[in-house]
Image (tube, rainbow, N blue to C red):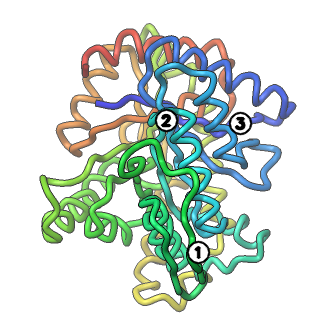
Amino acid sequence: MDFGIFLDFPTGGGAHEDAFRDSFELVDLADELGLDTVWLGETHFTPERAVHSAQMVIASAIASRTRQLRVGSAVHVLPLVHPLRIAEEAATVDQISQGRFEFGVGRSGNMRAYDTMGIDYMESKDRFQEALEIILQAFTGETFSYEGKYNNITNARLTPRPYTKPHPKVRIASSGEESFERVGRLGFPIFLSMRGMDVNELEVNLKHYHEAWKKAGHEGESGDISVRFPMYVAPTEEDALEEPRESIESYFRRMRERFQQGRFEEALADVTGGQDLIEARRARLERLESMSYQEILDTKVIVGSPDQVIDKLHQYRERLGITGFTAELNPGNLLPKEAVQRSLKLITQEVMPAFK
């Protein structure tokens, strides 16, 4: 079982310098405590929230300052950058880390970043698939050419080659019901977030992933499944429930606002099956708007004493087939760093040993 933490270098409305300092302090502590992986988000044009826009730069910095901690992208938004540049940077991080890099990829639901960069979100699915094909071909180290709708490449040969042979593990993010089957059919490990889905929806969607995996003839029951949960561990149940409450509620309030302000209906209007997806997203928004804190605790986060968290993780592993848990330790960015560091210590020292 892989244990990780998710970081997007949050500002909490404060100075950008503080965001880098505090996040690197948490990375150093994670390495010292023996955590498996740190997963890096990708955010653009939101200085009031986070400063994690140059993902591969930060991944290189983490790889250089740590000894055993793995570093993963969660995720690299492929349609926003030329795929050959992404392949070069990913291979470079893999070399610097000597194989401690995992390449998570996706296309994101952040339409604002696409709009700002002048890229049509309606093209994101095709751009993503084309970029992934190019990157995987580049990872072979052989000279190749490629003619696509958005990319035309002539006699390219990747430098450097990845340290990991044949290449770092590629993990595809999925956040919508429509993509689980596709990822399973393609045969990739999957990375999931509880931002939109609850655990019941996740269970249903993962069945589609497992079924598509087996139907496509891939080896085993499915690929490995990593899920990111808002997670908080405290010495007592009372502390675990009350200390992160404001931060967790703020986090899901922000999720509701993103759904309310998003342009998903416009983007999906002309897509085959788009109306079904629109209705599913409307239903999800309605659930988010009406959820109580207790309902959030029951279906969307993991909080508790070490023993309670161990029990819940065992249940989720059995129920969902999860092979990796990623903790979002301060989802609303309102907890003091001392509380976040204490939670990380409890995860690594008291929770992780039960799964190793």
Query: In the rendered image, which quarter is residue 64 located in?
Result: top right
Q: Residue at x 79, y 55 (%)?
A: 45
Give the number of the mark in front: 3 or 1: 3
Check the picture and name the quadrant holding the C terminus: top left
Q: CA distance from mark 3 to mark 2?
A: 15 Å
Which residue position holds label 1? 264
Q: Position of residue 93 (x, y in %)?
A: 57, 42
Please name the amino acid that badge 1 sits on: Phe
SS class, disc 1: helix
Tag 3–tag 2 contact (CB < 8 Å): no
Which residue position holds label 2? 230
Q: Position of residue 288 (x, y in %)?
A: 51, 54
Which residue position holds label 3? 10
Query: In the rendered image, which quarter is residue 197 located in?
Result: bottom left
Q: In the picture provided, is 154 more to the left or to the right than 234?
A: right
Q: Nearer the viewer, residue 92 or 51?
A: 92
Image mark count: 3
Q: Residue at x 47, y 74 (%)?
A: 129
Q: Position of residue 154 (x, y in %)?
A: 59, 80
- Sequence order check: which comes first, mark 3 or mark 1? 3
Q: CA distance from mark 3 to mark 1?
A: 25 Å
SS class, disc 2: strand
